[in-house]
Image (tube, rainbow, N blue to C red):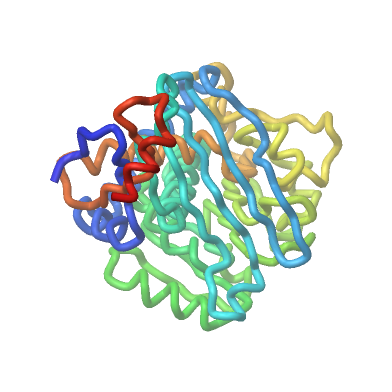
Amino acid sequence: MTLPSDKALVPFVSVDNMMRLIHHIGIEDMLRDLAAYIEDDFKRWEQFDKTPRVASHSDVGVIELMPTSDGEAYGFKYVNGHPKNTSEGLQTVTAFGLLADVYTGYPVLLTEMTILTALRTAATSAMVAKHLAPKGADTMAMIGNGAQSEFQSLAMKAICGLKSVRLYDKDPAATSKCAANLAGTGLKVVSCKTPEEAIEGAQILTTCTADKQYATILSDNMVGAGVHINAIGGDCPGKTELAKGILDRSEVFVEFPPQTRIEGEIQQMGEDFPVTEMWQVITGEKQGRTDARQITLFDSVGFAIEDFSALRYIRDRIKGTGFFFELDMLADPDDPRDLFGMVGRAKT
């Protein structure tokens, strides 16, 4: 099966086909590939339209749209975040995305992005850690063992050479789940009873909790010199994971400051709090880690360009495969001006 030549048919990657594609490519290879696509797009960051995501908040969660364009293709993701869903047997986060051709405005890809978002988030974390983590870092504390934890661990292994992951979650069942899923991956997995135990000997500290509240997952006295913090749980107004004192002692790196100052850890700080944009590090315009004892902090909230990269990657990788369906999404009358006539003729 090849990509359809009929301009009215749009490739759609379902959840089932996304999982088939992952197994076809191999999850670690796919994480490396995604990281490469994301890094390539960070290198041309200035070509993209950039806007903070459009969010609709409710008492129980948030629904967001994340759009961007590089002038040739346009992409967006629909994503929700509802922490209460877990107690109801539902996913906290679900998502789908679309890629379109700017010249015609026609969609060229529709895909699930619940799984793909987990992959691109992990790939982004590891891509950044490659630039910022201390040299030789091989142990990570994974604090918060929910849906992201395995992806984060495998991305750090595939891209940064991680050898050991130390797990902690306030729910022991989540830690047991994560440990079982990581068994046989080549990682040494240590289940811990406290966050303090989890960070012992770890050079990379990843926080990824779900509750939408100001929280202190890492207190100031827990973080010593020379570590890299990958803070991915704080991703909306009113939700943080790190003590303010940690930010004061860290060199903070972000994706898009106007969005991160609303949603990230730095929402705790003033508008003039200094940050470095990751695209500037990747292009060599600014430095990343400059000292072995420095604390680097990636205040990650997820940005639309990363989703655009993931959509580009899926568009490219499904060519020549059977891992998509063709959807009849676009009206295509013989005469573009005669849409009504097409509807009328359909009666017969």
Question: Front-most of 139 and 342?
Answer: 342
Residue at left 29%, top 55%?
Answer: 27
**Left or right of residue 113, residue 238 in this image:** right
Q: Is the residue 70 above or below the residue 133 in the image?
A: above
Q: Is the residue 45 above or below the residue 222 in the image?
A: above
Can the viewer see residue 54? yes
Question: Front-most of 141 and 37?
Answer: 37
Which quadrant of the figure has residue 198? bottom right
Where residue 29 appears, as percent x and y from the top left, is 26, 48
Residue at left 55%, top 37%?
Answer: 304
> Furthest-bottom residue in view?
173
Can the viewer see residue 134? no
**Left or right of residue 274, residue 298 in this image:** left
Q: Is the residue 284 above or below the residue 119 in the image?
A: above
Q: Is the residue 169 above or below the residue 129 in the image?
A: below
User: How many discs mark residues in the rendered view?
Assistant: 0
Residue at left 70%, top 46%?
Answer: 264
Residue at left 47%, top 42%?
Answer: 124
Where residue 289 appears, as percent x and y from the top left, is 56, 32
**Left or right of residue 59, residue 146 in this image:** left
Where residue 192 appears, as percent x and y from the top left, is 54, 75
Which quadrant of the figure has residue 53? top right
Where residue 279 appears, as percent x and y from the top left, is 54, 26
